[in-house]
Amino acid sequence: KAGVTQTPRYLIKTRGQQVTLSCSPISGHRSVSWYQQTPGQGLQFLFEYFSETQRNKGNFPGRFSGRQFSNSRSEMNVSTLELGDSALYLCASSLGSIYQETQYFGPGTRLLVL
Amino acid sequence: DQQVKQNSPSLSVQEGRISILNCDYTNSMFDYFLWYKKYPAEGPTFLISISSIKDKNEDGRFTVFLNKSAKHLSLHIVPSQPGDSAVYFCAASIGQNFVFGPGTRLSVLP
C-alpha cells in the first residue's frame, strides 16, 4: 500500500506570495491532518480534515487554510507569506479519528520564504 | 508558553543500554499522550501511546510511563540500538487537538 505523498517536496517563495501544498493520504484513510515543523517551535498542529470537513483547527492565523476533496486528498494554502512561514509542512493520514488511530506521516514539503 | 516540554535537546547512549527520554506537560486536561520518532528528511513515525487512565504501556523494546501527578511522561528504550538514533517528539492531546514537544535528539553509539 502506497504511503502518504506530499507535493511539492521543496518550494521557494517570496514574502507576500501565496502557496498551495498537496497531500495524498493512504488509500482508504479519511482523515488528513497538517502540521508545521520549525526548529524553534517544534511540531505544531494546523488542522484536520475528515470527509471534506474541517474537524479541528490549531492556533494559526487565518492566512493558513485548507480543504479536502471527495477522494480524501487535501490541500493547504498559505496566503500573504511571511518569512516566519519558512518550515517543513507535514501531513498525516489516518483511518478515522486521529485520537484513536495511528497517524501516518508524509515526507513533508519544505517551504522557504525569502 | 510551551505546554509540552522536552528539556533535553539531545541525549547520547551506548548501544545495548537503556535510553530514557523525558517529557513534561503543564495542562492537566491532556488525556492522551504519544511518542513519535523522526529520521532526517522523513516524516515522524508513530511509536507508542498511552491514555491518561493508564500509567504504563509497553510495546517490544519501548515502554512509556505516565505520572499524572507530576505531569511527566517518559519513554524507555531497552536495549538501545544504533537504528534508534533519531529525534523523538512527545505529544499530548485534548480530544483531537495535539500539542507537540520540541523534540530530543537521541544518538545511540556503537
Image (tube, coloured by chain):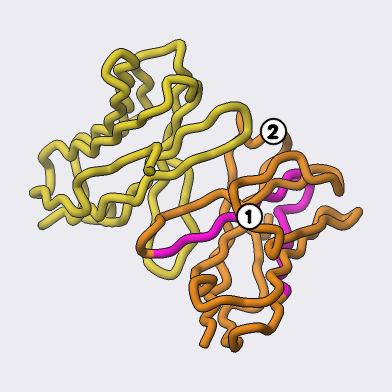
Chain colours: A orange, B yellow
Position of the C terminus of chain B, as image quadrant, is: bottom left
Give the side of residue B19 with respect to residue A27, left or right: left
Residue named by callout 2: A97
Seen in the picture, residue B19 relative to A90 is either above or below; the reply is above
Q: Nearer the viewer, residue A92 or A54?
A: A54
Q: Amino acid at mark 2?
A: Ser
- Within-10-Å neighbours for mark 2: few <14, some 14–19, many 20+: some
Region rendered in magenta: A20-38
Q: Position of residue A39 (x, y in %)?
A: 36, 64
Q: Residue furthest right?
A: A70
Position of the N terminus of chain B, as image quadrant, is: top left
Q: Earlier in the sequence, mark 2 or mark 1?
A: 1
Q: Is residue B80 magenta?
A: no
Seen in the picture, residue A52 relative to A21 is either above or below; the reply is above
Residue named by callout 1: A34
Task: Label the magenta part by its dominant secondary structure.
Answer: strand
Q: Position of residue B47 (x, y in %)?
A: 42, 40
